Amino acid sequence: METDELRQRRWLRASMAVSMRLMRFGEKKRPFYRIVVSDRRSPRDGRFIEQIGVYDPHQNPAKVLFKEERAIDWLKKGAQPTQTVRQLLIRSGIYKKWAEGQ
């Protein structure tokens, strides 16, 4: 049986209206992405709150740059990363630092 605190955390995560996601730029068939924090209701390439990184999958190896302090700050505030952004955070080690700080 889960405690009230765990139930409340799950509810907060599910109801959070801010997400960390990719914003597409570049030419046709040559995309690169900005990693942004945005309202979940805004379109993929629409308004955003803050840019926290860059992802270029066409470089070898793929280029991933984060503003580490800002990414951790947004995670602490409850922003929900998409699956792709979560994987990029894990690869860069930021997700582990955030998890240790909790």
Image (cartoon, rainbow, N blue to C red):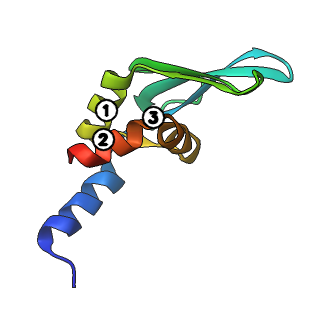
Q: Is residue 22 visible?
A: yes
64, 38: nearer the viewer: 64
Marker disc for residue 27: none
> Badge 1, how many Cα within 10 Å: few under 14, some, many 20+?
many
Q: Which residue is mark 1?
A: 72
Residue 67 occupies quadrant: top left
Q: Which residue is mark 3?
A: 20
The residue most toward the right is 29
Residue type (three-letter) at the residue carrying disc 2: Trp
Residue 71 occupies quadrant: top left
Q: Which residue is mark 2?
A: 98
30, 43: nearer the viewer: 30
Residue 37: x %, y % from top left: 42, 27
Q: Earlier in the sequence, mark 3 or mark 1?
A: 3
Rendered residue at 48%/38% (across/down): 89
Label 3 element class: strand
What is the distance, in whole Å, between disc 3 and disc 2 at their CAs? 15 Å
- Give the mark toward the camera: 3 or 2: 2
Left or right of 40 on screen, residue 23: right
Residue 19: x %, y % from top left: 42, 37
Rendered residue at 45%/34% (across/down): 20
Labels 1 & 2 near each other (Cβ < 8 A): yes
Left or right of 85 on screen, residue 5: left
Labels 3 & 2 near each other (Cβ < 8 A): no
**Quadrant where the image shows the N terminus:** bottom left
Q: Is residue 102 above or below residue 77?
A: below
